Amino acid sequence: MKKAIIPLTFLSAAALAQQPPMTQMPDLQEMFFMQFDVDKDGKVSKAEFLKPTESQFDHMDTNGDGALDQAEVKAFNDEMQNRIQELQRKMQPR
């Protein structure tokens, strides 16, 4: 069974969309470590950095052949476009 993986950038966008308007830029360094430093040792190992990418690849490789073909990339891009549109709808004032 494959898990649905939401790209980290979209998770961050969704989290930010639920926050009150920002008066200053978020601390991107802090956000980076929160996202990637899984063992919270103050360092991001290569394995920690690559894990989300590997998970994303597995999500995109719907036929499980270890390679991404044109149809799988298109399906992923369509999925991301739908998620972006949904976020935009949720962020619109009512």
Image (cartoon, rainbow, N blue to C red):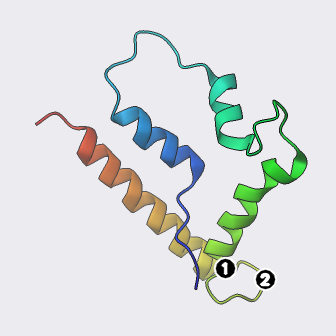
Secondary structure beneath label 2: loop
Rendered location of residue 49, percent (x, y): 80, 48
Mark 2 or mark 1, earlier in chain: 1
Residue at the disc numbered 2: 66
Question: Residue drawn 88% across and 44% down?
Answer: 45
Say few, some or many: other residues with alpha carbon within 10 Å of mark 1 (under 14 / 14 to 19 / 20 or more): some
Relative to 16, does residue 60 appear above or below in the rendering? below
Question: Residue drawn 37% across and 61% down?
Answer: 82
Three-letter residue code for mark 2: Gly
Say few, some or many: other residues with alpha carbon within 10 Å of mark 2 (under 14 / 14 to 19 / 20 or more): few
Residue closest to the far left: 94
Secondary structure beneath label 1: loop
Rendered location of residue 58, percent (x, y): 69, 74
Three-letter residue code for mark 1: Asp
Real-space Cα separation, disc 2 to disc 1, in angstroms: 7 Å
Residue closest to the far right: 46
Q: Which mark is residue 27?
A: none
Question: Residue drawn 39% across and 16% down?
Answer: 22
Residue at the disc numbered 1: 61
Question: Residue drawn 58% across and 48% down?
Answer: 8
Q: In which quadrant is the C terminus drawn?
A: top left
Q: Quadrant of residue 31?
A: top right
Rendered location of residue 13, percent (x, y): 46, 39
**Are discs 2 and 1 less than 8 Å apart at CB?**
yes
Specify whether 87 is left or right of 62: left
Specify whether 57 is left or right of 23: right
Rendered location of residue 74, percent (x, y): 55, 73
